[in-house]
Amino acid sequence: MISQTLKNRVIKAAFLLIACCVLSVDAREALDRPNVIIFFVDDSGYGDYEHNGNPVIATPNITKLAQEGVNFTQFYVSTAACSASRYALLTGRYPGRSGLGSWVIGPGSKRHIHTKEVTIAEALKDRGYATGMFGKWHLGSPNKANGMSQDTLPLAHGFDQWVGTNVSHDYGNAMLLQSDPQGDAPVKGYRTLAKNLPSDIKASESLTGRYTDAAVSFIKQNKDKPFFAYIAHNQPHLGLFASDKFKGVSKRGLLGDVMAELDDSVGRVLKALEDEGIRKNTLVIYSSDNGPWVMFRNAKKTKYGEARMHVGYAWPFRDGKGSTWEGGHRIPGIFSWPGVIDAHSVVREPASTMDVFPTLMKLSGAAVPDDRSIDGRDISPYLLGTKREVEPFEFLYSYSDNKPSAIRMGPWKLHIRTGSQTGNQYGFKASEKTPLLFNVEEDLHERFDRAGEQPERVQLMKKRLLEKEKQLIDEASYWGAVRPRKK
């Protein structure tokens, strides 16, 4: 006869065996449809971070993220302003394919990211991912010109939920919206949390914390299945806003306070992953949509107040947001995935935000669309440390009309036109007839034009730029024809 004690032990062992079997079925390996989190901050320059040499701005969580993963020292956005940069990240395609016509679209723009585009969110959703967006959209707004179309906003482009602003918070009619099936008209399916954000200081100060709270909640709700969280903070775009907890914490004034709150956001999200035991299943990416808004660096009085004290740093690169120079396009690029990406890794080969799309398709097992051009490359070998070669980096820089202004091949950058919101061309002038040529790995500040000593390279690069530009025009956009660049 079996004793009661022995029976209890047998029952307990059986339960443990069943539990282990369930866990082994439900638990995912790190490379099995990994979770993805993208932090995409606004107008933050390469030099705004302590791991990139800033002596007074403290970013311990972001710096730790870089130290625990791979830091790309030559990471780019294809254009130096909001809407076009976000399009390129989410689709892996040059902004010239968007049909938007300019690098920024306002709340009254008829056009938006077209429904035929395939975003990261849509592709991952097809692979069974939960998808959430927390932050600034800036790829379309419902308005009279487009019949208050819901196709303008994130839920039409692969996201299950969203809280954020339709455009940058400095627009007078910027709105803070949240997805809601019972949402109020005229923005059907969305609830209006705040209107006219520049005049609603408390709402603007709440944005970073609000997005972080929502992202943490999303992670906890979806911890048992693959998810994609796109956290697109409005800061440090002017005007700068920090919540009360972070006011006065930095030696760098309000800009430093804002960066401290962004850094805290990263820390809170990482803690949520650790608390839920899913950090090893999660690839975290950190980047920015362009460089700092340097056109306000010398402005004493603007609608942003003492804006010159609030502008960040692109150094050691020239200029910033809204320019064709390196400071507008070169941004932080961090990929962290403990146990998969080796800690303290540095990639000195160039890459771009357009590479994120095909890379995530490879890592998740999703299909890359074969009915359109994808301009990014799969850079997973840089992350996984495999010997498989990455396609050569050939990259177009776009200006305000989303047309090419420069091309990068190897260490060389050829300008056929230059632009800056400051109006400063630094003593240079570029055209198709007289391009500028810089070796941006030797000459970080683009000071020494080498075109005169490298005529064959100039001709080769110009030919390639014009070929790629022609392909953009010939392929057109889902909105119709793409107009040629004004010569």
Image: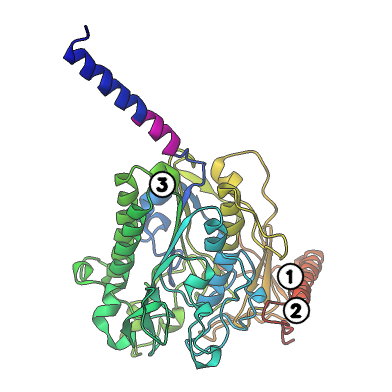
Q: Would you name the residue on which mark 1 appears?
A: 451
Is there any visible trace of residue 38 in the rendered image? no
**Magenta stretch, residue numbers:** 19-27
51, 263: nearer the viewer: 263
Decide which of tag 3 and tag 1 comes sooner along the chain. Answer: 3
* Relative horizontal placement of residue 296, taking residue 441 as reference (left or right): left
Q: Position of residue 430 (x, y in %)?
A: 69, 80
Which circle marks residue 67 in the picture?
3
Secondary element under disc 3, as helix, strand or loop, is helix
Q: Are marks 2 and 3 in contact (CB under 8 Å)?
A: no
Q: What amino acid is at disc 3?
A: Gln
Rate crowding at label 2 as few (under 14), some (14 to 19) or many (20 or more) other CA atoms within 10 Å. some
Q: CA distance from mark 3 to mark 1?
A: 38 Å
Which circle marks residue 434 in the picture?
2
Q: Position of residue 284 (x, y in %)?
A: 44, 52
Where 365 sits versus 328, above or below?
A: above
Q: What amino acid is at disc 2?
A: Thr
Q: Are marks 2 and 1 in contact (CB under 8 Å)?
A: yes
